[in-house]
Image: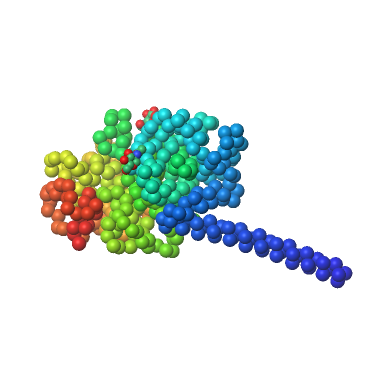
Amino acid sequence: MSLSGGVLAVTLVGTITAGIVAIASVVAIYKCAKVAVKVYLQGDGGSLHRVASAVTREPGSSGAAAGESDDAEMGSMSYFIEDLQRERPVRFSSQQLRAFTRNYAHKVGSGGFGVVYKGRFPNGAPVAVKVLNSTLGKRAEEQFMAEVGTIGRTYHINLVRLYGFCFDAAVKALVYEYMENGSLDGYLFDPPPERKVAFDKLHEIAVGTAKALRYLHEECAQRIIHYDIKPENVLLGAGLAPKVSDFGLARLCDREDTHLTITGARGTPGYAAPELWMPLPVTHKCDVYSYGMLLFEMLGRRRNLELGLHGRESQEWYPRWVWHRFEAGDVDAVLARAVATGDKKERETAERVCKVALWCVQYRPEDRPSMGSVVRMLEGEDQIATPLNPFAHLAAYNSGAALPSGDTTTTSGSYGSSGHALSAR
Ligand SMILES: *[C@@H]1O[C@H](CO)[C@@H](O)[C@H](O)[C@H]1NC(C)=O
Ligand SMILES: *[C@@H]1O[C@H](CO)[C@@H](O)[C@H](O)[C@H]1NC(C)=O
């Protein structure tokens, strides 16, 4: 009796110890993975290889690794389909990318960081393959790591899906879902007639974009700051459903650790928040500012500052013009640009967008709303308080005066708010 009790106890202790060891190992592996991600996000280019392989070695992920021979193709294909179902980015070989894009036959766009090609998976699903420009060296690698390390860990209806990536000596590329209707700028700035959309549609796009940012800021395990919200990075799928893309500047941060240290100017002039151009602490509220700039461009269906055009109106910085019309009680002047029809509901929607835009671009980050609050205000769930003047820190407004054109003497922030914020100091 006591003997078998002792055996039982020994067995139990053994089992429990094994369990603890197993749990401790899993925790240790998880922590290592987290540390690796942190290290590479701090720009340690040397850790890139390690991290790229760590991503494919995540628990449960299968090894559709690069460099597998062609006769292993079917095997890796079925692995990657399993992985797609698990919603994890897959590692592709450069041979697979060549097959998907039919040897890079169909170029659909290009930018500073590389060229985007249209392709298809063997099952017919269209994909966009962004091949990073290898002559950029470390910067291309940084962008690669930022994308895989942020968007690669997310899933949201309003975020573009990263299906996978290729990381080998010759090719660094990202494989995304293909968005058939291009980017939002094509619908805002002098669009052809078939791309002129009603304001209600723009409002839907605004809400979807805000939900994506709310998810990144408030709902992910680690907060993700995008840093480059602008119309070019809002892609449109079927039915113009919006998806935020381009996580090349994005960063992970702990939610408690709210202030990030940013070295060098970031984001795009005209959309980047003033604190990004100054030695001030940066938080996720810089995305809220850029989002506000995007809302102004939806309201005006024009760039906030149109450079290179002559004539007074085009020189006016649009957000400031909106504030002065708003302050003067002349919201109608703002709505006239946004809403073509006299539809009352649509005008109310546009007025909400106008107030939210003014809140989002408040000079002090703490005065800007959270993206969760932005969604509720845009959807009419929350009342919107009367916005404060976002531009009070700027020099006194000389009503009707044009802005100095191409304020080229200031630093890189010479376009839009940032330049003025700088010159106001
Ligand atoms: C890569 O970047 C270099 C330097 O910025 C540029 O000259 C070149 O045209 C780019 N190549 C591609 C394919 O975009
Ligand atoms: C979206 O793209 C599809 C496919 O290219 C096209 O048929 C449709 O007209 C586009 N919609 C708009 C509003 O541009």
Q: Position of residue 234 (x, y in %)?
A: 36, 42
Q: Residue at x 22, y 40 (%)?
A: 336
Q: Assign ligand 1 to one image quadrant.
A: top left
Instruction: Pinpoint residue 283: horizontal percent, then vertical percent.
Output: 36, 59
Residue 157 shows in the view:
no
Q: Does residue 51 appear in the picture of this structure?
A: yes
Residue 218 drawn above or below residue 190 = below
In the image: residue 330, left or right of residue 42:
left
Where residue 236 appears, as percent x and y from the top left, is 39, 37
Q: Residue 380: percent from the left, percent from the top?
A: 36, 49
Q: Which residue lies furthest to the bottom in this view?
A: 2
- Would you place residue 98 above or below residue 375 in this image? above
Q: Which residue is depicted at the point 73% across and 62% down? A: 15
Compared with 217, 68 (above or below) is above
- The mark total stands at 0
Side of 161 where 182 appears, left or right: left
What is the quadrant of residue 103 in the picture? top left
Q: Residue shown at 50%/59% (left/top)?
A: 35
Give whichever of 4, 397 is nearer the camera.
4
Horizontal side of 213 relative to 5 (left or right) equals: left
237 or 104, which lies in front?
Answer: 104
Quadrant location of the N terminus? Answer: bottom right
Q: Residue furthest right?
A: 1
Name the residue located 33 percent from the left edge and 55 percent from the top edge.
Answer: 286
Q: Quadrant of residue 19?
A: bottom right
Quadrant containing the C terminus is: bottom left
